[in-house]
Amino acid sequence: MDLLDFEAKDLYFQQEDSQEVQELIAFASELYASGEAELPLLRAYLRAPESLNVLVALNRFYYYQHRLTEALLIAEKALTLIREDLGFPADWQLVTLQHITDAPKEALTRIRLYLFTLKSIGFLHMRMENLALSKGIFEKLLSLDAKNRIGAEGLLELVDQRLAVTV
């Protein structure tokens, strides 16, 4: 299955949150430059803990604030929600190409989101110097995406270069 051969349906940002949550996210974006966006984002999270819109906003906030541990926690929460929706195994290491090929074509947008979220987790681990785990994630992604549509190959090369220097 080609991960680029899909019709974009069911995109996470098309899922509408309550008006209050939308306003909190918008308010947080106004406060980002001052570094005060966290509180409205956390309020949005408390009101909609399973909203991918909220999780993506929180993840971006923490990442750009260089708070990688918090960004990782949020990315893992998002991966869990997406995984549950797809019926994928709880452990990403157990996801196989068969899970992807057996999924209905309508699920391809969510599968791509799952894979990009896993890539994000791998990248965060790489930034946090958890190179062995990061390498495992990127290798898994390449086993699921032989055409490198998700873009894990270059990141795997970076991890391998860093591992070669540390040995």
Image: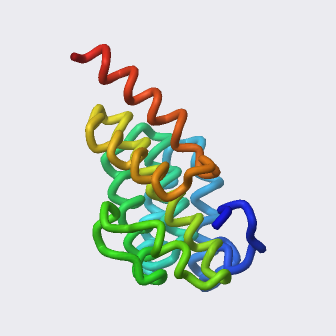
Residue 122, given in percent of the width and then of the height, sits at 40, 46
| The C terminus - image quarter | top left
The x, y position of residue 82, in whole percent, is 47, 74
Q: Nearer the viewer, residue 64 or 141?
A: 141
Q: Residue at x 48, y 66 (%)?
A: 55
Q: Residue 74: where, in percent of width, then height?
A: 39, 60
How far across and down, in percent of the image, does residue 80 sit? 37, 72
The image quarter containing residue 5 is: bottom right
Residue 103, compared with residue 80, is above or below; it is below
Q: Relative to the observer, which residue lies in front, 73 or 83?
A: 83
Observer-nearest residue: 61 or 127?
A: 127
**Horizontal side, residue 106 vs residue 62: left or right:** right
Residue 16 can be seen in this image: no
Please tell me which residue lies in front, 127 or 96: 96
Q: Quadrant of residue 45?
A: bottom left
Residue at 37% over, 49% down = 137
Indicate the quadrant containing the N terminus: top left, top right, bottom left or bottom right.
bottom right
Q: Residue at x 61, y 82 (%)?
A: 17
Residue under the image location 65 percent in, 62 percent down: 3
